[in-house]
Image: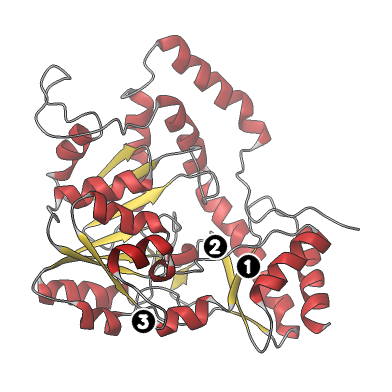
C-alpha cells in the first residue's frame, strides 16, 4: 500500500488543542499581542530548560544571529562559519556588517572541522559560529571552545536544529557565549515562526530587547539605537510554551524512529547512517544517511517522491560556497572545500517527525531497499 510520507511535520497534541485555543483566545481578548506575559513566560522557561540565565525571544533564528553579531560589533571583522549550513547563517554575518569566512566540515558529524577552521583564523577574525547539524551537538565543541579561548574569539551556537540535544547531559545553546534557536515550522519545536537567543551574558538582554523593537529605550518615544520590528507575538509564545512542555517526549520518539532506521539499514550495504557518540543525545531534526557506491543522489530523491510519495531532504547540498550568490560575492569555487563537496553530494535525510508511525518508518525502509538494490 502506497503511503504519503512528508520529510517533516509539526506536531500539536490533539488533547491540548482546547487549551491552546483557549490561551490564544485569552491573548486576543487581552489586547496585548506583543511584549506580554506569554513571551516573558516562554523566555523564562526556555532559559531554565537550556540551563542559562537569559533567553530573549525574537521573530526568527536569523534575527537572533544578527542581533547577537551586532551586539558583538563584528562590523568590518571576520566570522568563521561552516560551509555546511543554511544561507541564513552567512546572511546574518553580512547583515551585521561582518565578513563570513567559510570552513570545511568533519565528514562524520557534518559539523565544522576545528583543524580546517584553524587555517582560517587571521588578525581580523572576531569569532566562530558552530552549527549543530541535523540535531547533533558538534562532538568537537570543547575543542572549539579551547580555540576560542586561545585566540580570544567569541563562540555562537547556531542551534536551529538542536532543541533539547545534549552532549554529556549539557544542552545545545549553553556551550558557547550565545545560542541561537529557530522555531520554523519544520523544526523539532515550532511557534509557526520565531527564534530565541540564549546566554549567560548579563548585558545582552537589554540590548537585544531594544533592538528587537525598533531600538527603543524606556519606550518607543526614546530611540537609543538602530533596531527593527523583530518581536515574537504573544500567540507564537503560546504555541512555544506547549511545544516546550512536550520537547523531551518529542525527542524520545525521534530517537526511537532513528533506532528503527538504524536497525533496518544494517541490511543495506550501500546506505550508511552517520555515527553518534555515546555521550550525545541526538535531537534528530533530520536523519542523514550516506549513499555509497554509484547511487545517484538526485535520481534517488526523485524516484522516492514520484514512485512512492516519500519526501527526503538534505543538510545541505549544495553547500554555501557553491550557492550562486556567495560565488558571486566572495569568489568561492568548486573544490575549495573538498570534504563538504564529497560528503554532502552523497547524502540524503530520511523523513522523521515525532508522530511518524512504525509502519511508516518500515515503508520508507522497504521502498529504499527496493530502489538501492534494483
| Label number found at residue 258 | 1
- The quadrant of the rendering that contains the N terminus is bottom right
Check disc 3 and report its element: helix, strand or loop.
loop
Residue at image x 8%, y 73%?
A: 123
**Rendered view: 254 above or below 249:** below
Q: Is residue 123 above or below residue 241?
A: below
Q: Nearer the viewer, mark 3 or mark 2?
A: 3
Q: Is residue 338 left or right of residue 258?
A: left
Disc 2 crowd rating (10 Å Cα; few below 14, some 14-19, many 20+) is many
In the displayed structure, 264 sits above or below 222; it is below
Residue 279 percent location from the top left of the image? 43, 75
Residue ID at (25%, 54%) = 94
> Farthest residue toward the right?
1
Q: Earlier in the sequence, mark 1 or mark 2?
A: 1
Residue 136 is situated, as x and y percent measured from the top left of the image, at 45, 67
User: Of label 3 and label 2, which has the lower sequence position?
Assistant: 2
What crowding class fits label 3: few (fewer than 14 Cα within 10 Å), some (14-19), or many (20 or more)?
Answer: some
- Left/right placement of residue 189 relative to residue 321 reads right
Task: Give the number of the disc on residue 336.
Answer: 3
Element under label 2?
Answer: loop
To which residue does mark 2 refer? 284
Q: Quadrant of residue 128?
A: bottom left
> What is the CA distance from the residue labelled 3 to the residue labelled 2?
29 Å
Q: Residue at x 29, y 58 (%)?
A: 174
Amino acid at each position: 500500500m502506497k503511503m504519503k510520507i512528508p520529510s517533516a511535520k509539526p506536531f500539536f497534541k490533539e488533547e491540548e488543542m482546547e487549551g491552546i485555543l483557549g490561551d490564544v483566545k485569552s491573548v486576543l481578548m487581552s489586547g496585548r499581542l506583543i511584549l506580554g506575559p506569554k513571551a516573558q513566560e516562554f523566555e523564562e522557561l526556555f532559559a531554565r530548560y537550556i540551563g542559562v540565565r537569559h533567553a530573549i525571544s525574537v521573530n526568527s533564528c536569523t534575527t537572533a544571529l544578527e542581533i547577537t553579531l551586532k551586539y558583538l560589533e563584528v562590523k568590518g571583522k571576520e566570522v568563521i562559519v561552516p560551509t555546511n549550513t543554511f544561507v541564513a547563517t552567512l546572511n546574518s554575518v553580512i547583515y551585521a556588517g561582518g565578513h563570513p569566512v567559510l570552513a570545511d566540515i568533519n565528514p562524520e558529524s557534518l559539523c565544522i572541522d576545528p583543524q580546517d577552521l584553524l587555517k582560517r583564523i587571521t588578525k581580523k577574525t572576531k569569532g566562530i559560529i558552530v552549527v549543530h547539524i541535523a540535531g547533533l551537538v558538534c562532538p568537537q565543541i570543547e575543542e572549539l571552545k579551547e580555540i576560542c579561548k586561545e585566540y580570544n574569539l567569541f563562540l555562537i551556537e547556531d542551534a536551529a536544529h538542536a532543541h533539547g540535544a545534549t552532549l554529556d547531559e549539557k544542552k545545545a545553546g549553553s556551550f558557547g557565549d550565545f545560542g541561537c534557536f529557530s522555531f520554523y515550522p519544520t523544526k523539532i519545536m515550532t511557534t509557526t515562526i520565531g527564534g530565541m537567543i540564549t546566554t549567560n551574558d548579563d548585558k545582552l538582554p537589554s540590548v537585544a530587547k531594544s533592538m528587537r523593537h525598533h531600538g527603543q529605550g524606556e519606550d518607543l518615544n526614546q530611540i537609543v539605537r538602530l533596531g527593527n520590528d523583530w518581536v515574537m507575538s504573544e500567540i507564537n509564545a503560546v504555541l512555544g510554551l506547549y511545544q516546550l512542555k512536550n520537547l523531551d517526549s518529542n525527542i524520545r520518539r525521534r530517537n526511537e524512529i532513528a533506532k528503527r532506521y538504524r536497525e533496518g539499514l544494517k541490511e543495506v550495504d550501500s546506505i550508511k547512517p552517520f555515527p553518534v557518540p555515546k555521550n550525545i543525545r541526538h535531537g534528530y531534526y533530520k536523519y542523514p544517511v550516506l549513499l555509497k557506491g554509484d547511487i545517484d543522489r538526485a535520481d534517488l530523491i526523485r524516484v522516492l517522491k514520484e514512485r512512492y510519495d516519500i519526501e527526503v531532504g538534505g543538510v545541505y547540498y549544495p553547500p554555501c560556497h557553491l550557492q550562486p550568490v556567495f560565488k558571486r560575492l566572495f569568489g568561492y569555487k568548486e573544490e575549495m572545500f573538498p570534504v563538504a563537496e564529497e560528503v554532502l553530494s552523497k547524502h540524503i535525510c530520511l523523513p522523521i517527525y515525532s508522530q511518524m508511525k512504525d509502519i511508516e518508518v518500515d515503508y520508507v525502509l522497504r521502498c529504499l531497499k527496493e530502489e538501492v538494490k534494483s
